[in-house]
Amino acid sequence: MAANKKVEIRYLTSIKNGMAEFYTPQTSNETMLVQVAAGAIDDLFVHHFQTDQLFVVRGSFVLVVLSDRQYQYIPLSEYSPAVVKIPPNVPHAAINLSDQPCLMVNAVLRHGAPYPKDYQPRRIPFPYDLQVAREAIANLELPLTA
């Protein structure tokens, strides 16, 4: 049976109780708090023995996924709560073109011991289309200001 190498996006609903909103936590072996710096344009990462489950807590960024020699640009924001699940062996990167850092939770699922090369960036095979990344994040529904 072939491994599922498709990135999944699941938009979350919440339960409101008074002033608090509760979102379903993600099952994980390890939970990391990750910050993507303002203006960051990362090289690609490929994890061989882990599944990343990303949830933006503050700010926004564009997740870039390389599949069949094409980039897919997935905008993620605190204003549109979603968990993105990146299975093993899927090249991915983060682009944050805003002037604010993005803070997210990564609920990691381990499929073996951590592999040191999983955390070493790889050069991108061809340039990102930053205009497409800008448009992807601009098309997210943003909250109305008073």
Image: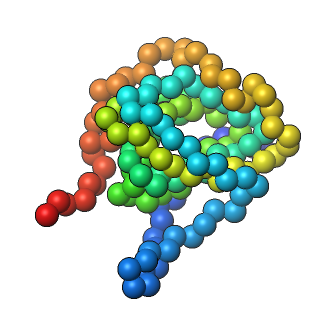
Nearer-the-camera pick, 107 or 125: 107
* Residue 49 spot, x, y in % from top left: 78, 39
Check the picture and name the quadrant holding the C terminus. bottom left
What percent of the width, then of the height, locates residue 64? 49, 33
Most extreme residue toward the right is: 113
Quarter of the figure with residue 27: bottom right
Query: What's the image's color scheme?
Result: rainbow
- Residue placed at 43% from the left, 59% from the top? 81
* Residue at position x 56%, y 43% in the image: 34
Q: Can residue 90 be seen in this view?
A: yes
117 to the left or right of 71: right
Q: Where is residue 78 in the image (x, y as percent from the top left)?
A: 39, 55
Q: How many marks?
A: 0
Residue 84 appears in the picture as rendered? no
- Vertical side of 70 occupied by 47: above or below: below
Judge left or right: residue 117 versus residue 5: right
Q: Which residue is drawn at 48% across and 28% down?
A: 71
Most extreme residue toward the bottom, as rendered? 18
The answer to which of 21 and 73 lies nearer the viewer is 21
Q: In this view, does 44 lie above or below 107?
A: above
* 71 lies left or right of 143: right
The residue positioned farthest toward the left in the image shown: 146
Residue 9 location in percent, x, y?
Answer: 52, 53
Residue, x 42% and y 21% (percent of image)? Answer: 128
